[in-house]
Image (spheres, rainbow, N blue to C red):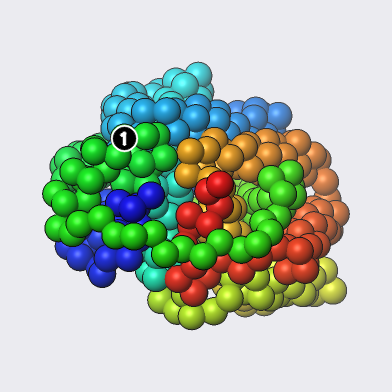
Amino acid sequence: MKAAAAAEDVGWSSVHTLLFVAFSIGTTVEAYVYSLAYIATSWVYMPKVLLALLAVWPPLWLLIGGAVAGPLADRVGRKRTLYITLAIYAVGAAGLIFSYTYIAILVFVGLLLLASGGEYNTIMTATHELFPRRYRGRALFLELNFTNIGGSIAAILAILAISSVVAQRELLGITLLISIIVMYLIRLRLPESVMWLEAKGKAERAEEELKRYYGTNILQDSVVKPSKLPPVWFRILIGGVIGWAYTAGFSLIVLTLGPYFFPSLTDWLIFIFGIVAFLAGFIGLVADRFNRKPMLLFSALAVVVFGYLFIPTLNYWLKNTFIFWLLFVGVSVFINIYFLAEDTLKSEIWPTKRRGLYTAIVRVISLGGSIPVIFLAVNLPVLSYMWLGIGIFAAGLCAAVAWYIWGIETSKGQSVRIWDK
């Protein structure tokens, strides 16, 4: 793994800046597409049971996209997989502009979500392999943070075009097509993962990529691996639970709270969360200075504690929107820090040859597990709804405690290749 060692130990270069821009646009588009399904609930009339179907559409198709792209990225490479997801994006975006029926909306939003799930899974996988190890935690935290601004962009465009459903649909679709073109032009200049190439036995190609993109030669591997790693089953369990807690909890607190209880606030809930979370996400600038385990634990605890404040103040915030927004802003900060910590952890703790696959598995668990929760929540009164959200985040807290006790530290420049046998 000499070429991989060199790629992990180089300094920051223009290639890494380009990678960061490309992946940040990718995560922005992922959140933009995820939010589209909820914004589209206002485009055509639908009964509440169909509203619930559209509410679970995003996790369902993200799940399928990740399940397909994870093994695909391990087989054909990270770069090729990102080209495939871009092609699917283009078809979905073009179709969205001409979606005048409920069925068309489901089909083309589904295609966009399929591409988005595959894209996001591949970005998480590739970031750990393409960035220098002393910057990779910081890079992924900040890349993932752009998911927040993506939802806000979709929401503000919807708000600006609120006077016309057709204008909303066209504006959102055209903006997405422009983003796809930009991503394609940037990705023409990106390298393949040197780490993946070596893991697949393509040493010569790995050395070529190293010299072409990083301008350096191979180095002797100096990574010291821990004497004992947590077993794979434990990593899958922790990754699945912490991811499920975020996906299901975030969906309840931010995305379906509007369509289910406050339809007129749906766009604003997505917009405000995105802005607040994006600002809080700049904690990623110091992500490599703190240990990942206590950050995950603290953020999970903070979400549960702050989320609980919705319960005793229920009768107040149902009548006073200022109190509601105050609580909503506070919980948004901690939900995002938890999201950055859990998404980074659950994509880095795998061997290179199977990183795409295992990242997809834990995302399937988290996304798939959120679907019955969203269906259940549609029939709950608001108090039970909030208790459900708190209970879900409490499960994430339990998993964070388990990782704090039995997991290992992965930040502060730790090589991701410690997981390779």
Q: Is residue 331 above or below residue 235?
A: below
Q: Nearer the viewer, residue 119 or 38?
A: 119
Residue 94 or 336: which is nearer the viewer?
336
Residue highlighted by disc 1: 202
User: Residue 124 vs residue 391: left or right?
Assistant: left
- The picture quadrant where one finds residue 193 is top left
Looking at the picture, which amino acid does disc 1 mark? Lys
Residue 102, compared with residue 371, is above or below; it is: above
Which residue shows up at 33% across the image and 53% down it? Answer: 2
Q: Secondary structure at mark 1?
A: loop
Residue drawn at 53 percent across, 57 percent down = 418
Q: Is residue 190 left or right of residue 356?
A: left
- Residue positioned 72% across, 49% down in the render: 231
Q: Is residue 385 visible?
A: yes
- Occupied quadrant, residue 14: bottom left
Task: Classify 10 Å Cα crowding around label 1: few (below 14), some (14-19), many (20 and above).
Answer: few
Task: Please tell me which residue lies in front, 303 or 39.
Answer: 303
Where does the image place residue 98, in percent across and percent down from the top left? 33, 24
Closest to the observer, 135 or 206: 206
Please say if 238 is above or below 276.
above
Q: Where's residue 248, x and y in %?
A: 68, 49
- Residue 322 picture quarter: bottom right
Number of on-image labels? 1
Taking the spot 45% from the left edge, 79% from the top edge, the residue there is 286
| Residue 108 drawn at (x, y percent) | 42, 25
Whole-percent x, y for residue 53 in the image: 64, 30
Residue 395, compared with residue 358, is above or below; it is below
Query: Is 317 on the left-hand or right-hand side of 145?
Result: right
